[in-house]
Image (cartoon, rainbow, N blue to C red):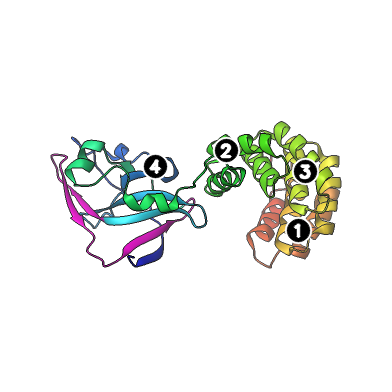
Amino acid sequence: MKKIILITFFVCLFQYSFSQTTNDKSAFNVKYYDAKDKWVIFPKKDTDSIHPFGFIYLDMQAGFTLNFEGTVVIKNDGTFKLYKNNSDGMVKYRLEPYKTADVYIIPDKIIENFGLTNTPDWLKYYQPTNNENIQTLKDYGFNYNHVGACEKALIYLEKAYKINPHFDGLEFELAYAYNHLGQYEKAIPILDKAISNNPKNYYFFRELGFAYVKQNKIPLAEKTYVKGIKMSDNDFEKSEMALNMAQGYFQSKNRKKFDEWAKITRQYAKPNSQYAQYIDLFEKEWDSPR
């Protein structure tokens, strides 16, 4: 069995110019999570002449991963020259959410010219045996949510929800996706049912409070966050809920209630943390036009 080298990896969005026939930077226009099970080329650094290339797949446990295959030189006439990885083992890079650059999906004809197959033999070891299994559907949803591709996550999560609404972790992932997409009216009934089934999960209260704030249902949000903070044992989560509530009162120009929740935020947020800095910013901007 081949040795596998695991490396956390992200490709910064460098300046680049490339297409098959012209120098066109728009060639790198596919999000890496939209290139699952595809051969891809990444943009190069300004100071380099080579582009990393490989195969992107989804490891359900580790997330989106690049199986690094080598480098490519793209000539001025748009032709490709391949330099294969000579490592003894498979080199795998975990692709980091929000940091990995957009990619170029290699056309089938070029893959053939490289002497590669569209689907590597090793991929079968990472593919679920049953794509309709509720655990698999939830795991797909989790991984797409994790990288911010919530529209894709919903494809799997909504299907799983029809099978078993209360499957472990499913309601949170579904509500999270709806909230991320601004579909608060869909998140709220999901969370209401989730809380009825499991009233001790503070993550449900965190998401429900967020949905209420975004719908400007401030009293409901406050009641929800008070419960969530009371049952949570995680100061970071408490500070996030408190910050969201403080922001709700900041936007509704209720200074007294804002001060109350600003104090709670600082109680749980680490000094100089991002959440504490947000409170500082709100206080400085309080009298500014909004």
| Relative height, residue 89 to residue 221 (above, below) | below
Circle 2 Cα neighbour tier, 10 Å, few/some/many (<14 / 14–19 / ≥20): many
Q: Tell me residue 218's x, y (percent).
A: 82, 40
Task: Give the number of the disc on residue 148.
Answer: none
Residue topped by disc 2: 156
| Type of amino acid at the residue the image marks with label 1 | Lys
- Residue beneath label 4, please? 35
Graded by Cα atoms within 10 Å as few (under 14), some (14 to 19) or many (20 or more), the crowding at tag 4 reads some
Q: Percent x, y for residue 48?
A: 23, 57
Q: Nearer the viewer, mark 4 or mark 1?
A: 4
Left or right: where 286 falls relative to 38 = right
Question: Which stretch is magenta?
Answer: 70-98
Nearer to us of marks 2 and 4 is 2
Place residue 49 in its image quadrant. bottom left
Q: Nearer the viewer, mark 2 or mark 1?
A: 2
Alpha-carbon distance for marks 2 and 1? 30 Å
The answer to whether residue 72 is seen in the rendering is yes
Residue 215 horizontal side relative to residue 90, left or right: right
- Placement of the C terminus among the 4 image quadrants: top right
Residue with the mark numbered 3? 194
Q: Which mark is residue 238?
A: 1
Upstream in sequence: badge 2 or badge 4: 4
Distance from disc 2 to disc 4, alpha carbons, whole Å, reads 17 Å
- On whether residue 245 falls in the magenta region, the answer is no
Q: Look at the numbered disc 3 and give the secondary structure of its residue.
A: helix
Looking at the rendered image, the disc whose residue lies closer to the viewer, 3 or 1, is 3
